[in-house]
Every structure is written in structure tokens, then in C-alpha cells.
């Protein structure tokens, strides 16, 4: 009910000319926007309609590890490099804080990406082309992908995911001919070390070098490389070069003590990361517990030993 009632019979009055004009303009606008909506759907090059499967973080991580082990052609800064065959399934895992693997794709060929997350929500954003997809853990996002231009593309994370968020930069290079690999430093990709060196099959002891090679695989495949660098930079976690034998200041039960990094210390740091927390990293998100076997850990130790300053 209004305060003042309008004059009797007001609605019999003719609509004024300018009011009519506005009504027509509004109607035309509505109709053209409606038509545009349909056209946009058909011609607007929208994001592909999404195919999504349910998965679990452990299942997808296993899948991606098996995929990388089988297909990797080298390592780029601790990240495995895969050069998938056209028309095959490609598994891309996001985790704190990296995209793995790095990819070499052929121009104008089709690939089927499967993207998922090992921990929390990340955003798969290909730059500079500005394609964006949200990646939730527990889902396998399927994306038909056909690069139409050569060049280097960065995959950045566009969902804030903690202190390492800004370091989470993946790499996709699109090539046309073999020579293009040179542009990206990929011309001498070495084959990944065999997962099981010959000696093992013959029941002989693995040499320290073999163990270190296997340890390097753990480092790249299990994602230690996402936080631990080898170039001395310690932004997210202690750098691994020169780590073995070093004096490390750690906090145990709230007290600061000094330990020498030896095999036992490394073993404990992996199995029970919160027991002794390295000074300088106590405010970082804690190191996750990885399901590594005792053998894996021995190999990691051999690898860390092999990393001199
Ligand atoms: Cu992220």
C-alpha cells in the first residue's frame, strides 16, 4: 500500500511518446542480447564442455607417476619432461608447488589432458593465452588440447595455495620441427635412468651411483623437487646440495639444538618431519609425510650424498 493513492483511472491514460520509445529500446536490447547469448554459445569459442571423472588423490598420483616413469625423456630443474605421442592421454599433476611433468607438444596435433591435484585447489592457467581451469583434488579433468602456435607457454597457478604459490610455474613447449627443441634447451634430453638398473635384477648390490640415480628419480617423481632445490636457494625448504655432513640448526621439543646431517637425520626428517624442524622453516607449512619405502629413502640418502656444494 502506498502513502498516497494514485488518481482514479490513471492506467487509462495513454503512455507518453518518450516513454514508449524507451520501452521499445529496452525490448530491442533484450531480444538482441538473447540472440547474442545463443550465438556466443555456438560461435564464441567457449571453454570446452568439461568431462570430469571422480578419482582420488592417491589414485591419480599413482597414475601420474606411472605415466611419467614410462614416458619421461629428461628432467628440467627437477621436473620430469614428457614428450607425449599425439592422440594419447597425458597426465598432469598439480601439487604444492609444481606442475608435473613439463611437456613437449607438436603443433597442430591433438592431446587429451587429464589434470588433477594431489593436495588442494589449484588453477591451471596457460599463459600468455589466458586459458583457465580450476583443478580440485579428487577429480580428473579431461581437456582436449590442440596447440595451434609454436612457442613456450607457462602454466601458472591462479588459485592461491600457500607460500610457494608464486613459484608454481609449469612449462609447455610447442614445436614444429626437431630443431625447435634447441630453443628451449631440450636438444640433448637424456633418457631417464632405468627404474631398475641391471645389477638389481642379477641380485647384486647396487653401486652408490645406481642408488643416487634412483634417489634422483624419487626426487623428481615424488615431488621433493617442488620444495627442495639443488641450486642453494632455500625459499620453501632446505636446499639439498651440500646438505650431507652439514651442521643444521633444528628445533626439537621447542629447544634449538645443532645436529650434523647424516643418514639417520635424513631418515628421521623424511619419516617424521615434525620431530626436528630446521630453523628458518618453522613458520613454513610443514613438510608432508610421503609414503616412501625404506629402499626409496636409502636411495634419497645416496642422492643427497652425491650432491656436493
Ligand atoms: Cu597452486
Image (cartoon, rainbow, N blue to C red):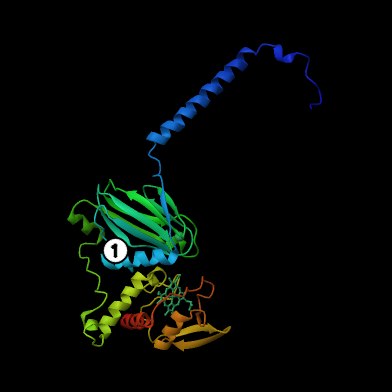
Residue 173 in the image: x percent, y percent?
28, 55
For residue 160, side relative to residue 299 (left or right): right
Residue ID for mark 1: 81
User: Which quarter of the rendered picture does the N terminus lie within?
Assistant: top right
Q: Nearer the viewer, residue 71 or 122?
A: 71
**Residue at the spot 27% in from the left edge and 74% down from the top edge:** 195
Q: Quadrant of residue 301?
A: bottom left
Q: Is residue 307 above or below residue 6?
A: below
Residue at 57%, 84% (x, y): give it.
253
The answer to whether 53 is drawn above or below residue 189 in the figure is above
Q: Secondary structure at mark 1?
A: strand
Label 1 neighbour load within 10 Å: few <14, some 14-19, many 20+: many
**Residue 28 placed where, x, y %?**
51, 22
Percent x, y for residue 190?
A: 22, 68
What is the quadrant of the C terminus in the image? bottom left
Residue 84 appears in the figure: yes
Amino acid at each position: 500500500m502506498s502513502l498516497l493513492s494514485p488518481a482514479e483511472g490513471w492506467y487509462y491514460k495513454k503512455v507518453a511518446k518518450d516513454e514508449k520509445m524507451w520501452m521499445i529500446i529496452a525490448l530491442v536490447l533484450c531480444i538482441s542480447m538473447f540472440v547474442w547469448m545463443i550465438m556466443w554459445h555456438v560461435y564464441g569459442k567457449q571453454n570446452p564442455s568439461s568431462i570430469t571423472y571422480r578419482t582420488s588423490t592417491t589414485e591419480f598420483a599413482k597414475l601420474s607417476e606411472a605415466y611419467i616413469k614410462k614416458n619421461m625423456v629428461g628432467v628440467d630443474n627437477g621436473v620430469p619432461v614428457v614428450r607425449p605421442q599425439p592422440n594419447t592421454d597425458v597426465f598432469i599433476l598439480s601439487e604444492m608447488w609444481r606442475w608435473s611433468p613439463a611437456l613437449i607438444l607438436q603443433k597442430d596435433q591433438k592431446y587429451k589432458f587429464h589434470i588433477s591435484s594431489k593436495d588442494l585447489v589449484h588453477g591451471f592457467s596457460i599463459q600468455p593465452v589466458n586459458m583457465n581451469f580450476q583443478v580440485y583434488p579428487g577429480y580428473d579433468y579431461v581437456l582436449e588440447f590442440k596447440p595451434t602456435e609454436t612457442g613456450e607457454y607457462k602454466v601458472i597457478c591462479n588459485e592461491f595455495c600457500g607460500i610457494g604459490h608464486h613459484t608454481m610455474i609449469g612449462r609447455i613447449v610447442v614445436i614444429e620441427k626437431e630443431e625447435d627443441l634447441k630453443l628451449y634447451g631440450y636438444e640433448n634430453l637424456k633418457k631417464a635412468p632405468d627404474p631398475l638398473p641391471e645389477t638389481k635384477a642379477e641380485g647384486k648390490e647396487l653401486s652408490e651411483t645406481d642408488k643416487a640415480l634412483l634417489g634422483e628419480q624419487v626426487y623428481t617423481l615424488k615431488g621433493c623437487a617442488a620444495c627442495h632445490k639443488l641450486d642453494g636457494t632455500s625459499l620453501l625448504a632446505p636446499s639439498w646440495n651440500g646438505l650431507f655432513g652439514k651442521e643444521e640448526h633444528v628445533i626439537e621439543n621447542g629447544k634449538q639444538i645443532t645436529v650434523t646431517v647424516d643418514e639417520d637425520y635424513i631418515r628421521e626428517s623424511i619419516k617424521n618431519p615434525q620431530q626436528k624442524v630446521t630453523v628458518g622453516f618453522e613458520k613454513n607449512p610443514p613438510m608432508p609425510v610421503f609414503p616412501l619405502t625404506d629402499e626409496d629413502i636409502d636411495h634419497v640418502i645416496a642422492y643427497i650424498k652425491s650432491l656436493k656444494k
